[in-house]
Image (spheres, rainbow, N blue to C red):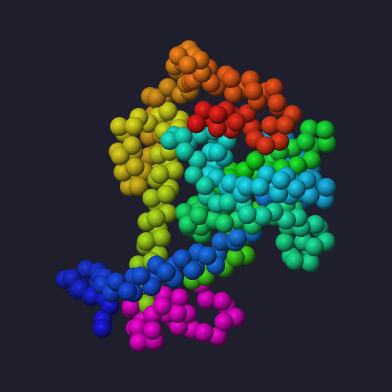
Amino acid sequence: MPNHETTKPPAGGMIRIRVTDERAVERMVMESSAIIDSIVPERILVAPWGHVKTSAGSFIVDEASAQATIDAFAAHGTDVPVDYEHQSLGGAYSSPTGQAPAAGWIKALSVVGPAEAAAQGIEPGVWAQVEWTLDAREKLATRSYRYVSPVALVRRTDRRLVGLHSVALTNKPAIVGMKPVIGSAVRPALLPDPGDDALPDARLRAMLHLDESATEDIVLVAAAERLAALEHASAQRDAEDRVADAAGAGKLAASQRDWAMSLALRDPGEFERWRAAAPVVVPLGRLAPPDARDPDGSVSGRSAEIAARSEYRSNRAFLEKLCSEDAYVKAALR
């Protein structure tokens, strides 16, 4: 049964082909998930070996350091989050909504020394086994995000890494020379391998779950439909990120969000020109005065923040190995 319709407009117009077989569309979606899974690695480097230079200072990763980090992970007993742009740190890193969705979860850590790394053809350092969310897989596969950046817990006495608070997906990693999650050597799964004897159209049929009876135009339409869907999803995420950045800078009121999304989708360049010239219309930071104690004697609001900061600073020697002061305060205020 045909799974496409072809309409021919007047001379000089374009021939438009629309896929109408829902099962074919479903197969494309399923195959696209398999393609993404094959591109995005589940094992990633989170801290390279040696003297690691970052925009916030430097630290050391060696055998002792890597083992201390793994021991801390095991002792904590929970998965380490991979977030977006360090949002789980709170404070200056908070998203406009205050939420910090996970991009994935680190399930295990391992150390790969220089000798072992050379044998495997990979970078030495601390590697993580990650369980990605679907959203993060798509962002990595479409190159919306390319790098990870760890929030390193560093021992002050010798500047050695001793733990991980979290890891973030970002396009501006703090570590100098950090390698992208998906290297340039990775070949997109839709492209034929030069060493593969299978014809490109046969490979595309197999990847799109089309049988041999599918003609060339059906194969091309199926591939084009899927690429268009991925392109739209990437544009949508890009627009959301632009709008979130503008809101975070105080240049966008809540009532302007729909308009901003429309502009960011339609003309990203014009949106960036507007954002560069737009004034701050939403005051940043906490404006409310310190709250008094509640009738039951408990503290809330600003008083709770002060109490949390005081508690963190009184136990800094222990707590700073687990999280930052801002992250601790944010957790206390939830």
* Residue 40 in view of the camera: yes
| In this view, 78 is above or below 98 | below
- How many numbered dots are placed on residues in this image? 0
* Residue 245 in view of the camera: no
Q: Would you identify the image quadrant in which residue 92 lies?
A: top right
| In this view, 173 is above or below 11 | above
Task: Identify the residue at image location x=30%, y=32%.
Answer: 255
Q: Is residue 197 magenta?
A: yes
Q: Is residue 171 magenta?
A: no
Residue 213, image x, y percentages:
35, 87
Q: Is residue 102 left or right of residue 79?
A: left
Residue 192, image x, y percentages:
52, 76
Residue 333, image x, y percentages:
51, 28
Q: Is residue 241 left or right of residue 181?
A: left
The residue furthest left is: 10
- Front-most of 47 and 265? 47
| Prevailing SS of the magenta stretch | loop
Range of residues picked out in magenta: 191-218
Task: Identify the residue at image location x=51%, y=34%.
Answer: 94
Q: Quadrant of the N terminus?
A: bottom left
Task: Identify the residue at image location x=38%, y=50%.
Answer: 236
Residue 201, image x, y percentages:
44, 81
